[in-house]
Image (cartoon, helix red, strand yellow):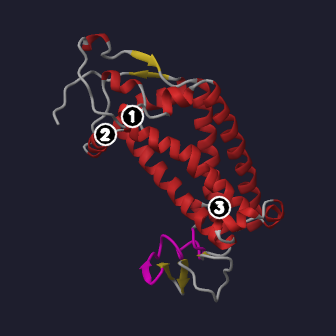
Amino acid sequence: MDAATPPVTLQNPAESEGELIYRTRLPVRIWHWLNAIAIFALLMSGATIFNAHPRLYWGKYGANYDDPWLVIGKRGQEGFVQLGSLEVPTTGILGYTPYSTKAIPPIFTIPNYYSLAEGRQWHFFFAWILLASLVIFILYALLSKHLSRDLALKREERKFSHLWRDMKNHAKLRFPTGEAARSYNPLQKIVYLGVIFVLIPLVVLTGMTMSPNLNAAFPLLLDLFGGRQSARSIHFLCAVAFCAFIAIHLLMIVLAGPFNELRSIVTGWYRIPAVREIGE
């Protein structure tokens, strides 16, 4: 999601125009791709697990006759998504398709057929990969100063006026040039910090809360999240947040120049776009 801070005009723009810089270090690139594989596998295996009971509840209890806040289901050959009292027909997409009667069709699941046991095996395997890679990355980010140098918001960036200007540039699809392209912009930093320190820990903790075996070892988690069904709902919402993040991330890569962005995350090298002036 390499979108831009407000572009600036350098005193000597020719010095940085088209410059190739080493922007993404190897540990960051490894973590990025390892996370990408793990999260996609978790989302798709999680869809298989969700298909076992495609209803979500708040509180400690949840069964067919309880009152769910979300249902993905079917009636005959019609699929639907029910959110509270709102029902949306989703035939052919969710709930019912010509090749599946499950809530989420097999094209989006691992395995690509219904097997709760196999789905759980995939899910738990990649959950451990996600957790281990997060711990290692945080240690690296602290020891290498990647966290304070590249991800922490600078004093100027924490000002509302600066954040507001950055949000307007995102909305207008203004991408960084010159010095602004050398580092993450404030909105990127906020999103990345949110994923690293909020979204991933939350999905791990709610996943632990849903495990009866781990409930015995960490009973506080049940109280923290208000019961296993509430933890399951929060876990699902985290998955939706991951899907939104991935969609926006990929869109920004395409709009900003996919070759340059992919080169940065594969090789570490990034070519700074030419400096240009943009009016407010």
- At 77% from the left and 57% from the top, the residue drawn is 121
| Amino acid at the residue labelled 1 | Asn
Q: Is 108 situated left or right of 170 in this image?
A: right
Task: Determine the CA span between mark 2 and mark 3.
Answer: 35 Å
Q: Residue at x 42, y 31 (%)?
A: 154
Between 183 and 218, the one lying in front of the other is: 218
Q: Give percent across and percent down for residue 66.
A: 62, 86
Query: Disc 3 designates what residue?
Result: 46
Residue 278: name its quadrant: top left
Vertical position of residue 165 compared to residue 278: above or below: below
Please identify the quadrant where the C terminus is shown. top left
| Earlier residue among tags 3 and 1 | 3
In the rendered image, the residue lying farthest to the bottom is 65
Instruction: Tell me where residue 56 appears, x and y as whole percent.
Output: 59, 75
> Which region of the structure is painted magenta?
84-104
Q: Is residue 98 magenta?
A: yes
Residue type at mark 3: give it. Gly
The reply to whether the magenta stretch includes residue 198 is no
Above or below, 47 against 176 in this view is below
Task: Characterize the local packing of mark 2: few (<14), some (14-19) or many (20 or more) Cα atoms within 10 angstroms.
Answer: many
| SS label for mark 1 | loop
Identify the residue position indicated by label 1 in the image.
185
Judging by the rendered image, the residue that carries numbered circle 2 is 166
Which mark sits nearer the N-terminus, 1 or 2? 2
Q: Amino acid at mark 2?
A: Asp
User: Circles 1 and 2: CB distance less than 8 Å?
Assistant: yes
**Mark whose residue sits in front, 2 or 3:** 2
Report x, y in % for residue 198.
Answer: 57, 50
Residue 175 vertical position relative to residue 18 in the rendered view, above or below: below
Mark 1, Cα crowd under 10 Å, few <14 / some 14-19 / many 20+, is many
Say which mark, if any, is on residue 20.
none
